[in-house]
Image: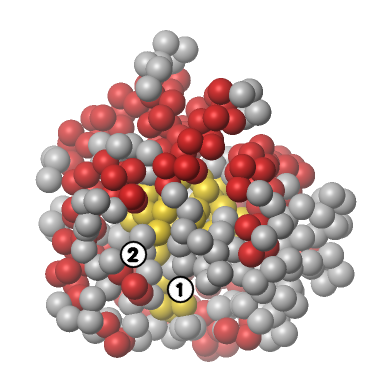
């Protein structure tokens, strides 16, 4: 495996290139690769796999893990080896990411030999900060030991049991914004302690949706409330938000064009960045979810997301009914948009810097390998 130092030396050089008008021509490929996160199949590295090849070529800078990437036996050792092999292939250390919220969204469940984790709603209902801290420390410590350095948690959505994808699945701490922020803070601090990045979600608020954006359009125009922004405001003001994940919800009160928030400049740049003051990295929710993939063409959705202010585009390869997207094709589309002038290189540079700032904050390569 490359040494930790050499990996970050390369990262620092590339960051300097991005700030320089004299960056090497092929540095654009590297920058674009850092703005892509991809899911893959298998419990071990297949060197002929398109995602592995894209990582090695610098065209994918981050990967996403699911239950499908964990073997039924010898789980911890196998997963560490898998992560190690991906990190070894990358010139710049990867974000190795996962949805590990607890409850139903628990990729490392007890069937795979990992401890069971309660849901956010269980913790919010218990309303014991010490308990939230304890369970969050358990989750964060497990991820850190495995070499996973980015968790798509905590959820900042308001609890509404009528929401099929969040409230009904007990993924939300509470209905009251201050209670959400109180528990989410403990999740973030527990991860920070072991240098695992967190990502709050789903901006600007998915909790009052009455449909599932995995399956189609989720319009919250009539149900969304302004106080759903409050947990974001409170945590951003405390400097605790390292990254934000967008929601694919439609909100006609925030953007009259009724574009999903992920594709809305009024919501991502206007509200999240300008009004709430968040200047860190913004990640899309899965671009393969039906709210995006069935409503917009691939090139159009990528263009709109980047224009909106999204920095990193996620493609999970985990949505039923949606074919696998090629990582090379995603990279090619983004580069083509830049060459055609539909996306400026300045936008790419800005997003690249935000990702690099996150990656430089803490070591991304586990020293346990």
Residue drawn 61% across the image and 48% down it: 298
Does residue 36 appear to the left or right of 79 in the view shown?
A: right
Question: Which marked residue is nearer to the observer: mark 1 or mark 2?
Answer: 2
Residue at the spot of label 2 = 41
Quadrant of image for the N terminus:
top left
Residue drawn 72% across the image and 76% down it: 211
Residue 202, position as x, y percentages in the image: 61, 62
- Residue nearest the viewer, comparing 95 with 64: 64
Cα distance between the residues tagged 1 and 2 = 21 Å
Quadrant of image for the C terminus:
bottom left
Q: Residues within 10 Å of mark 1 (few under 14, many from 20)?
A: many
- Residue nearest the viewer, comparing 200 with 23: 23
| Residue 167 seen anywhere in this rendered image of the structure | yes
Q: Residues within 10 Å of mark 2 (few under 14, many from 20)?
A: some
Q: Is residue 186 above or below residue 5?
A: below
Residue 155, position as x, y percentages in the image: 56, 69
Extreme residue in the top direction? 22
Residue at the spot of label 1 = 101
């Amino acid at each position: 495996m490359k040494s930790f130092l050499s990996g970050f030396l390369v990262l620092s050089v590339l960051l300097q290139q991005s700030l320089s008008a004299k960056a090497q021509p092929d540095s654009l490929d590297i920058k674009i690769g850092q703005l892509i996160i991809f899911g893959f199949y298998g419990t071990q590295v297949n060197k002929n796999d398109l995602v592995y090849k894209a990582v090695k070529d610098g065209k994918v800078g981050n990967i996403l893990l699911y239950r499908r990437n964990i073997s039924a036996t010898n789980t911890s050792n196998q997963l560490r080896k898998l992560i190690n092999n991906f990190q070894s292939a990358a010139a710049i250390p990867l974000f190795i990411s996962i949805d590990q919220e607890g409850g139903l969204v628990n990729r490392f469940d007890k069937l795979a030999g990992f401890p069971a984790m309660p849901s956010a709603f269980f913790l919010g209902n218990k309303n014991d900060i010490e308990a939230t801290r304890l369970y969050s420390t358990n989750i964060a410590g497990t991820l850190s030991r495995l070499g996973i350095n980015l968790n798509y948690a905590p959820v900042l959505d308001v609890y509404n049991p009528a929401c099929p994808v969040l409230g009904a699945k007990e993924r939300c701490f509470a209905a009251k914004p201050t209670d959400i922020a109180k528990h989410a803070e403990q999740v973030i601090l527990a991860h920070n302690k072991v240098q695992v990045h967190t990502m709050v979600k789903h901006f600007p608020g998915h909790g009052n949706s009455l449909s599932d954006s995995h399956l189609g359009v989720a319009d919250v125009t009539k149900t969304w409330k302004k106080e759903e922004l409050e947990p974001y405001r409170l945590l951003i003001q405390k400097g605790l938000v390292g990254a934000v994940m967008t929601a694919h919800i439609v909100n006609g009160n925030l953007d009259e064009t009724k574009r999903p928030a992920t594709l809305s400049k009024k919501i991502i740049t206007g509200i999240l960045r300008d009004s709430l003051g968040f200047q860190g990295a913004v990640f899309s929710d899965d671009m393969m979810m039906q709210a995006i993939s069935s409503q917009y063409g691939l090139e159009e959705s990528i263009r709109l997301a980047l224009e909106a202010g999204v920095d990193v585009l996620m493609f999970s390869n985990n949505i039923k009914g949606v074919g696998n997207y090629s990582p090379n094709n995603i990279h090619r589309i983004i580069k083509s948009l830049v060459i055609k002038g539909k996306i400026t290189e300045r936008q790419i540079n800005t997003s690249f810097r935000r990702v690099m700032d996150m990656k430089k904050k803490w070591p991304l390569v586990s020293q346990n390998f």
